[in-house]
Amino acid sequence: MVNKIKTYWHRKILDEKEHFNSLQYLSPIYSLGHCHPLISISTSDPKIIQKLPPRVKIATGVYILQSQRAKYNSNAVDPTCQLCKNGEETLSHFLLTCVTLDAVRKPILEKIVRTAGRIFSESNRVNNIELLRLICDPYNYCKNNSDKIFDNISKILEPQFDFFLQYRITEKKI
């Protein structure tokens, strides 16, 4: 009976995810009753727990970018990137192409791509890696949370992503 209930909710969550464009980058790797691997907070401080890390906001589509402000604000808001003034500030622009963030982004992204290439080539499973999906939630490339890739992502890639998003990119934006 318990397995049927878990199976029902697992399918329900996956079905619902397909209807929400904001969840397109969030991987379905999780176990019912446990947190998604992106939300691994290693503290009991309530102030920190209440504040979602930028990475989780990006993966779940709630990180506010200029294009979203312009879309949902009743006042006239310019969707143009406030950093470079070259084009609409979308998730892809903010994380991959904003020229103002190039100096910050390039070195760490090169390291992430090399590390991910090494991890995924060892598995002989992943041939095509979408960089934006990798940055938002690398667990998209795992079969389950007991997968060897899962462990390598958690131990090797996660610290690089956290550094990239939390300490480099988002501090420039604020």
Image (tube, grey):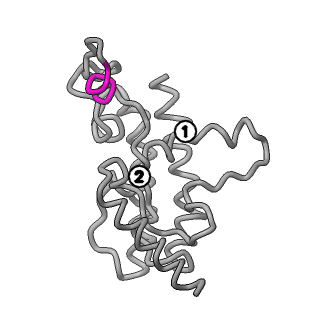
Q: Is residue 137 rendered to the left or right of residue 163?
A: left
Range of residues picked out in magenta = 66-73
Residue 140's spot in the image, x, y percent?
A: 40, 66
Residue 70 included in the magenta stretch of the image: yes
Residue 51 included in the magenta stretch of the image: no
Q: Amino acid at mark 1?
A: Gln
Name the residue nearer the viewer: 11 or 101: 11
x 36%, y 30%: residue: 65
Instruction: Check residue 129 in the rendering and tell me which mark sits there, or answer none.
Output: none
Residue 114's spot in the image, x, y percent?
A: 41, 60
Q: Amino acid at mark 2?
A: Ile
Residue 68's spot in the image, x, y percent?
A: 31, 30
Number of residues whose C-alpha sits closer than 10 Å to that of mark 2, classed few (under 14), some (14–19) or many (20 or more): many
Name the residue nearer the viewer: 105 or 27: 27
x 36%, y 55%: residue: 25
Rendered view: 173 above or below 143: above
x 38%, y 41%: residue: 106
Q: Is residue 68 rendered to the left or right of residue 35?
A: left
Residue at the disc numbered 1? 166
Q: Is residue 67 rendered to the left or right of residue 166?
A: left
Magenta stretch: dominant SS?
helix
Residue 81's spot in the image, x, y percent?
A: 29, 23
Q: Secondary structure at mark 1?
A: helix
Residue at the disc numbered 2? 135
